[in-house]
């Protein structure tokens, strides 16, 4: 019997690299060259700068902390956190073999991270194959909006976090309700126009009552602040919102979406 499942899973997990190469070739080197990735993190994007808005010593109390970097990507956030003395180990979880085997070692080295603390884990958002109450801290940078079902991920993270632990969602870009509805209306009008003309579009945005899939190539989903709050409440997290005022990119933008952090604690 031919077993296609593993091959199909590998193909699905590599879809990020495939989408970048096919639809955004101008950015491909950033995701295949560790030096270019680190240059982007430090000189082109504000994701690293935005971490300074978080009081990490207040959140990361105690010793020998075990951390989960969810959808770790190239590992730049794991590298950053590995430099804290009280962090013992970081599980850097990502679905991309290239990110974990090629990019992460180079990025960690270039950023001065402590590689011995970082354990690459190739997996999807859910299920998390660890015991209840495993982690002291879960972090995810600009990641959770890629999840097929955000509440499934939040519920699973609630299970694996220690009662005294925290989850920090970094660098998300929630929209205020008026801007969210405007974005939804524009996409809806575009879908209607294509439908009237009978056009078949293989990759096109979609809208639902719970989200807007605005970049189907990379799986980018837009949520409003109210939708984030609702998802946290449904999955029994208390939350604190940190608005950084920074946009994703250092270059000027006409209507930037500002980076926002959510600090979550379990409600029991």
Image (cartoon, rainbow, N blue to C red):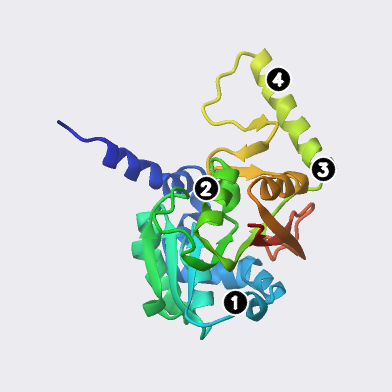
Q: Residue furthest left?
A: 1
Mark 2 or 1: in front is 1
Q: Residue 22 at x, y = what percent? A: 46, 43
Q: Is residue 209 left or right of residue 199?
A: right
Q: Which residue is mark 3?
A: 177
Q: CA distance from mark 1 to mark 3?
A: 33 Å
Tell me the residue at 59%/18% (across/down). 199
- Closer to the chain start, of discs 4 and 3, is 3
Question: Which of the 4 image quarters holds residue 11?
Answer: top left
Work out whether 133 lies above or below 155: below
- Closer to the chain start, of discs 2 and 1, is 2
| Callout 2–callout 1 Cβ contact below 8 Å | no
Work out whether 82 lies above or below 120: below
Q: CA distance from mark 4 to mark 3?
A: 24 Å
| Callout 4–callout 2 Cβ contact below 8 Å | no
Q: Could you say which disc has been placed on residue 60 in the image?
A: 1
Q: Secondary structure at mark 4?
A: helix
Q: Which residue is mark 2?
A: 24
Q: CA distance from mark 3 to mark 2?
A: 29 Å
């Amino acid at each position: 019997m031919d077993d296609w499942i593993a091959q199909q899973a590998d193909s699905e997990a590599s879809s990020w690299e495939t989408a970048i190469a096919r639809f955004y070739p101008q950015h491909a080197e950033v995701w295949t060259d560790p030096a270019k990735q680190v240059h982007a993190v430090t000189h082109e994007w504000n994701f690293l700068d935005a971490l300074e808005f978080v009081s990490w010593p207040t959140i990361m109390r105690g010793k020998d902390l075990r951390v989960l970097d969810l959808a770790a990507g190239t590992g730049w956030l794991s590298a950053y956190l590995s430099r804290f003395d009280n962090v013992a180990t970081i599980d850097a979880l990502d679905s991309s073999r290239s990110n974990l085997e090629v990019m992460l070692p180079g990025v960690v080295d270039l950023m001065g991270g402590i590689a011995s603390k970082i354990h690459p884990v190739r997996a999807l958002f859910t299920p998390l194959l660890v015991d209840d109450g495993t982690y002291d801290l879960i972090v995810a940078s600009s990641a959770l909006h890629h999840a097929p079902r955000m509440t499934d991920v939040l519920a699973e993270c609630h299970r694996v976090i220690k009662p005294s632990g925290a989850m920090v969602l970094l660098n998300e870009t929630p929209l205020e309700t008026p801007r969210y509805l405007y974005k939804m209306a524009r996409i809806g009008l575009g879908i209607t126009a294509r439908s009237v003309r009978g056009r078949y579009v293989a990759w096109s945005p979609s809208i639902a009552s719970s989200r807007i899939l605005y970049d189907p190539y990379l799986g980018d989903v837009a949520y409003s602040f109210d939708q984030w709050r609702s998802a946290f409440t449904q999955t029994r997290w208390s939350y604190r919102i940190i608005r950084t005022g920074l946009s994703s990119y250092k270059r000027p933008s006409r209507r930037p979406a500002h980076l926002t952090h959510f600090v979550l604690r379990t409600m029991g």
